[in-house]
Amino acid sequence: MIAEELRRLACAVQFLTRLPVAGGGEWRDERLARSAKYFPLVGILVGALSAGALLLARQVWPQGALPALLAVAVGVVVTGGFHEDGLADTADGLGGGQTRERKLSIMKDSRLGNYGALALGLVLAAKVLALAQLQPPLAGAAVLVCAHGLARAAAVTMMVATPYAADLDASRLKPSARAARPWEAAVGLLIGAAPLLLLDPVVAGVCVLAGALASAWPALAARRLIGGHTGDVAGAVEQVFETGFLLAAAATIAL
């Protein structure tokens, strides 16, 4: 039992990041669904690495946005731009096609369109500038860890709450590999929420609310326009939650 849970955790790390993983065992699509509850834990790991980069960079550049840019860049490198790619594809698909089928086709296209480029650029800029406003550096580090963990929890929750919209036969994963269970999403939420203890309760509450409201937009838009979610939509939800959380933190901590 414990060994299998460790394999599921390794599966989550393999799926969401470019980090080398030992002891993951043979890849199984079904194991991916059971690993969803660990997605927020992987997010906390990514957030911790980004936070470490922020703190180190602040020792060299005490002022300015460069440490924030480097911290965000570390997150992108560690994940291989996995969620950012989903955001861009979702923006292109939902903003482009006139029909459900055309929107899904655009989302599958690896080329970057105008909507995707704009969404990606604006979100990355907002995250960098919001993080640059957070002082002292330890506050920014704590916010990063919280934002990354809860953003993955938001994505898993959305995947449980909405149907899968893409063609099942064309998908690389079997339906069972996407079917995270409600209780697994609840466990993921608890894991993702744990770092909130690092923040002031009022700040934490405002940031969670802002992230949830922000991430509801791509989730509801996808539900209306394509009938549910895809992997790209999950990436968009993660990115938008993270951005809303950081913006709210910059505003509330400054006050």
Image (spheres, grey):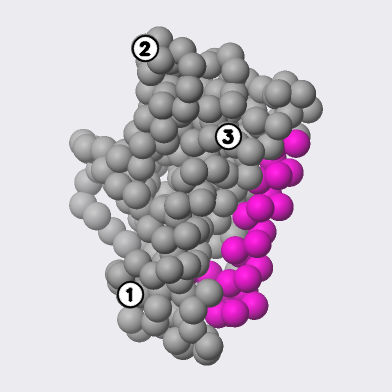
Per the image, label 1 sits on a secondary structure element best described as loop
Q: Position of residue 75 (x, y in %)?
A: 38, 37
Q: Can residue 251 be seen here?
A: yes
For marks 1 and 2 on the same chain, the one whose residue lies earlier in the sequence: 2
The answer to whether residue 18 is left or right of residue 134 is left
Disc marking residue 60: 2
Q: Judge the density around disc 3: few (<14), some (14-19), many (≥20) Cα neighbours within 10 Å.
A: many
State if disc 1 and disc 3 touch (CB < 8 Å): no
Amino acid carrying mark 3 in the image: Ala
Per the image, label 3 sits on a secondary structure element best described as helix
For marks 3 and 1 on the same chain, the one whose residue lies earlier in the sequence: 1
Amino acid carrying mark 2 in the image: Val
Q: CA distance from mark 3 to mark 2?
A: 20 Å
Amino acid carrying mark 1 in the image: Asp
Magenta-drawn segment: 206-230
Q: Nearer the viewer, residue 220 or 71?
A: 71
Task: Give the foreground label among 3 and 1.
Answer: 3
Identify the residue position indicated by label 3 in the image: 130
